[in-house]
Amino acid sequence: MISPVFILSAPRSGSTLLQRVLATHPEIATVSESHLLLPFLYPLRRRGVYAEYDHKYTQRGFQSLIAEMRGGEAEYLAALRELALRLYGQAADPDARYFLDKAGALSLVVDELFAMFPDGKFIFLWRNPLSVVGSLMRTWRGGRWNLHEHEVYLFRGTPGLVDAYRSREPAVLGIRYEDLVDRPETVTARIFTYLDLAPGDANIEEFAGITLSGGLGDEPGMRAYGNISKAPLEKWKDTLANPLRKAWCRRYLEFLGRDRLAIMGYPLDELLLELSNLPFSSRFLASDLVRMPYAALFKLFEGRILRDKLDDLRNGRRIYLHH
């Protein structure tokens, strides 16, 4: 039977690059990002879903069902595990030993993943948080401020990953994006050894030829880089150099804290020093003065839901409450 291996990381941490590199091994199957498990795990939670149906009532009914099950929640997770393995197997070649799954949103359900797959393989991919923040803005807004769209991964997902990694070490594997692009052969050999696969069966130089079905993941990165490049390592410095962004990043690093950052492999004092040494830049400053307050209002009033409702009105569709 196929076995799952999960890449767990914040968005923009290089997970698509790592996924494509690992997929050069003939015993690893994958698609871009399946998001298979998220809708099955969120009925266990009262908050976090807003829909046309009332999720809170759905969650109460779901909990009533689980309460009557002899095995309770553990039995539900076991059944979900069987479903996931069956579907992963259907999406994999017959000779594959592993199905590799990844998505930034998996950082929000990592404890449930551990419960579902107690013997599973988990690769934690860390990246300099300043690089993550800079890449989030460059990739999806051309450098303009957009961190309000990703705060759940920055402020809940990343700390949750660190705590999960600490709770399961050494049964899980942690690697840094910077080491992956600097010493790809060494890092991938560690991963293949962790997976009990022969490193020599993969040709990581052929990763650019790996196409991922599904249309998710780092499509801009796949288009821009045909080889493993160190070029992205310094891009954050140009993106984050204005004083508003430096102040935000300083608070974010302090939120993550010295201990979490050390587990990830990034000394807090060094990151703060690099940030403070950035030369003054006014790039995006005027835009940030507008977009930062707008971001606060966007979060408060759930701008995406409002935007969808306005789109429905423009197209003559009835609008409904989201519960």
Image (cartoon, grey):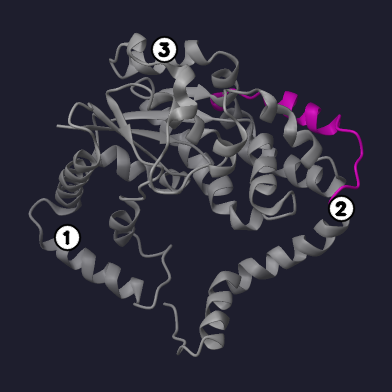
Q: Residue at x 69, y 48 (%)?
A: 137
Hey, which quadrant is residue 90 in on the image?
Answer: top left
Considering depth in this image, is 306 or 58 the residue closer to the camera?
306
Check disc 2 and give the amino acid type: Leu
Instruction: Provide the residue span drawn in magenta.
Output: 263-285
Mark before the other along the chain sequence, 1 or 3:
1
Q: Using residue 165 as the reference point, say whether residue 234 is left or right of it.
A: right
Residue 266 x/y as whole percent = 63, 25
> How many residues crowd around disc 3 within 10 Å: few (fewer than 14), some, or many (20 or more)?
some
Residue 84 x/y as whole percent = 22, 45
For mark 1, give the secondary structure.
helix
Q: Residue at x 62, y 70 (%)?
A: 300
Hey, which quadrant is residue 164 in on the image?
Answer: top left
Residue identifier under label 1: 66
Check disc 3 and give the amino acid type: Ala
For mark 2, give the secondary structure.
helix
Residue identifier under label 3: 189
Mark nearer the viewer, 1 or 3: 3
Residue identifier under label 2: 285
Instruction: Say whether residue 31 is magenta.
Output: no
| 3D distance between C-alphas at marks 1 and 3 | 42 Å
Q: Residue at x 76, y 62 (%)?
A: 291
Q: Quadrant of the C terminus?
A: bottom left
Residue 94 x/y as whole percent = 17, 31
Mark before the other along the chain sequence, 2 or 3:
3
Q: Using residue 220 as the reference point, say whether residue 191 is left or right of it.
A: left
Q: Residue at x 79, y 46 (%)?
A: 245
Hey, which quadrant is residue 302 in on the image?
Answer: bottom right
Residue 135 x/y as whole percent = 66, 41
> How many residues crowd around disc 2 within 10 Å: few (fewer than 14), some, or many (20 or more)?
some
